[in-house]
Image (cartoon, grey):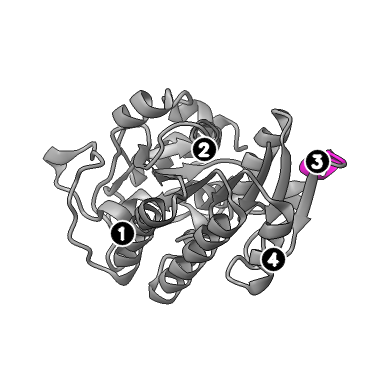
Amino acid sequence: MRVMVCGGAGFIGSHLCERLLAEGNEVDAVDDLSTGSIPNLAACRSATGRFKLQNVAVESSEFAELVSVRRPEIIFNLVPLSPALCHAAGGLASVTSAVAVLEAARLAGAAKVVACIPAGLLYGEVKAKELPVKEDHVSQPRTAAAVFARAIADLHSVYRDRHGVEFTVLATANVYGPRQRPQDGVVAAFVEALDSGKPPLLHGTGKQTRDFLHVDDAVDALVRAVDRGAGLTLNIGTGVATSVRDLWGLMAGESGLAPRAGSPRPDDLTRMSLSPVRARIQLGWSPFTKLRDGLRTLR
C-alpha cells in the first residue's frame, strides 16, 4: 500500500514507519519537525524509493496538495494531542490538524484514517472501581484539552457519517520506548535521570498510577487497525495500573538514587488503566510486552 504517517518523525511515528516499510509498503512521513527529529528516521531513509520525508505542517494548505498528489490509501494521524500539545492552545491546534487530515482524506479518496488520542484526556479521572476503563465510559471533561480530545473523536464519526471517510481511533495508554523525549513521558524522564546520575522529580506523592504500553505494542495495534475496527474508538493499553513510584523502583535497581518530591501538577490524573478487551475482539490485538521486559530495551 501507499501509506502516509502524519507525525512520522516523532517517537511513535518513526517506529510505525519502520514497521510499515518492513511489511513492504510505500511510506510518506509528514512532519513539520517542531518536535519530530530526522535522526529518528535513520533506518527508514535507507529504504530508497519506498520512503519519503515530507517537511510539511498538517494544518497547512501544502498538506492538502501533498495528499492529492501522493494519493495514500491509508493516513495515520499521530499529531492530535501529542505530549507537546496537551494544553488549551495545543488542543485547539490538534482539532485543526484532525480536520485537515479528514478533509484531505475525503478529497483524495483515501480508504481510511487511523488516529491516536491519549486515553487520559479522553476519559479523565476514573473511579477505582471502574478500572480498567472501558470505551463506553462517560467522562466529565475538566480541562480544555479533554474537551478537544472528545471533539476529535467525534469529528471522525461525523466525517464517516457525512462523507464516507472510514476511520479507527485508538485511545492509547502511556506509550514508552526508544526515542521518546524525556519531556514527553515519565519513563523517558527516568531514563535520563539514571543516565545522568541525578535523582528524578516525582510530581506529588508518586502514588498516581498509569498504564504503561511499549511502543512496539502500540505500533502493532496501529497496523492492525488498517483493515479492522472500522468506525470505532478502541482502547490500546495493558489493563495493568502501575504507580509512578513503583515504576522508579523497577528502573532504579541498585543505582541508590532516591527521587525528589515535587508539587503535584494541576489536573494530573490519580489513576488510569485501560481495558484491552474490545481491541482484542475488533483488532485481534493484545499487548505482548511485559513492563519489566520493555524497560530492559531502554538502557
Q: Quadrant of residue 283?
A: top left
Q: Is residue 263 visible?
A: no
Which residue is drawn at the image coordinates 44% and 37% (left, top)? 213
**Mark 4 or 3, nearer chain start:** 3
Residue that numbered label 2 is attached to: 222
**Residue 65 numbered mark, or none:** 4
Whole-angstrom CA distance, mark 2 to mark 4, is 25 Å
Q: How far from the left and from the top, in percent, is residue 227?
A: 51, 32
**Mark 1 or 4, nearer chain start:** 4
* Three-letter amino acid code of the residue under disc 1: Arg
**Residue 50 numbered mark, or none:** 3
Q: Is mark 2 on a helix, strand or loop?
A: helix
Nearest to the eye among marks 2 and 4: give it. Answer: 4
* Three-letter amino acid code of the residue under disc 4: Glu
Contact (Cβ within 8 Å) of mark 2 with mark 3: no
Which residue is drawn at the image coordinates 52% and 40% (left, top)? 255
For the magenta stretch, what is the residue range? 43-48
Whole-angstrom CA distance, mark 1 to mark 4, is 28 Å
Nearest to the eye among marks 2 and 3: give it. Answer: 3
Q: How many marks are shown on the rendered structure?
A: 4
Asked if the stretch drawn in magenta spans residue 46, the answer is yes
**Mark 2 or 3, nearer chain start:** 3
Q: Quadrant of residue 267?
A: bottom left
Residue that numbered label 1 is attached to: 150
Which residue is drawn at the image coordinates 51% and 30% (left, top)? 224
Q: Is mark 3 on a helix, strand or loop?
A: loop
Count neighbours of disc 2 (C-alpha within 10 A) and say few if under 14, some if 14 to 19, many if 20 or more. Answer: many
Residue 122, above or below 264:
above
Whole-angstrom CA distance, mark 2 to mark 3, is 20 Å
* Three-letter amino acid code of the residue under disc 3: Arg
Contact (Cβ within 8 Å) of mark 1 with mark 3: no
Which residue is drawn at the image coordinates 68% and 51% (left, top)? 71
